[in-house]
Image: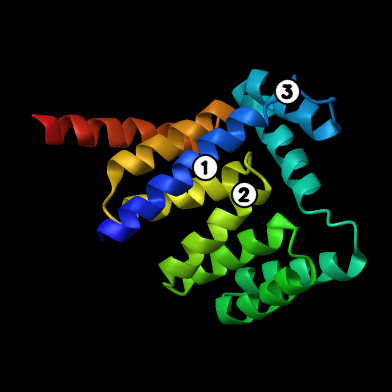
Amino acid sequence: MVMHAHRFKCIVTALCLTVGFSLPGYAQQTPLDELFQELAAADEGTSARIERQIIAQWENSGSPAMDLLLRRGKEALEDGTPEVAVEHFTALVDHAPDFAEGYYGRASAYYLLGRIGPALNDVRQVLALNPRHFEAMRGLALMMEELERPEDALEVYEMVLAIHPNAREALDAVDRLELQLEGQAL
């Protein structure tokens, strides 16, 4: 368990450093950077639309074959066959190792199969490739909660909110975890 705590702290530290160094302003603006700026300033009603636009950009590999593997993996998840999804996402990761969505999909499938270790490893890879991947961060926070690490989960949810201030699940989780941790402190 101590080894897992150390590994998690390394992941969170790397994430913080990566996000800090990748913030817009130091690099030329891209459409994705502009969407993240819009997301940070959006109201609750507009943020869902912007979130969908960001995810659509993340899911575009630039290769029809890779997009097909992604789509098949997502369909397998929707059909309730995560073991099949793992196969599609593994093929995607093998053929496009720099495409974060392959790792994200496989992390989701591993999680559904109860394989937390491989899921955490794939989330780490997603965040190394795409440090603003708020969906992967939410998944990481959820896993931290299930591992009974509410302080770590709270920290990750707060990272999500720094990127996506209207993320309803993260807002609710922060409120819930703060109350839980206050209760433990009493």
Say if mark 2 contacts mark 1, CB within 8 Å. yes
Badge 3 density bin: few <14, some 14–19, many ≥20, Cα 10 Å? some
Badge 1 density bin: few <14, some 14–19, many ≥20, Cα 10 Å? some
Say if mark 1 contacts mark 3, CB within 8 Å. no
- Report the disc number at residue 14: 1
Q: Identify residue for label 2.
A: 128
- Left or right, 116 with respect to 167, comes to left
* On-image quarter of the N terminus: bottom left
Cα distance in 3D space between marks 2 and 1: 8 Å
Q: Comparing marks 3 and 2, which lies closer to the viewer?
A: 2
Could you tell me the amino acid type at mark 3? Glu
- Residue 71's image quarter? bottom right
Instruction: Please state the horizontal and vertical placement of residue 119, each as a whole percent of the image.
Output: 50, 64
- Report the disc number at residue 103: none
Could you tell me the amino acid type at mark 1? Ala
Up/down of 28 relative to 100, above or below: above
Q: Comparing marks 1 and 3, which lies closer to the viewer?
A: 1
- Residue 85's image quarter? bottom right
Label located before the other in sequence (2 or 1): 1
- Left or right, 88 with respect to 140, comes to right
Q: Disc 3 on helix, strand or loop? A: helix
Up/down of 81 relative to 13, above or below: below
Instruction: Please state the horizontal and vertical placement of residue 42, each as a whole percent of the image.
Output: 66, 21
Q: Disc 1 on helix, strand or loop? A: helix
Q: Identify residue for label 3.
A: 38
Which residue occupies the foreground of this view, 21 or 154? Answer: 21
Label located before the other in sequence (1 or 3): 1
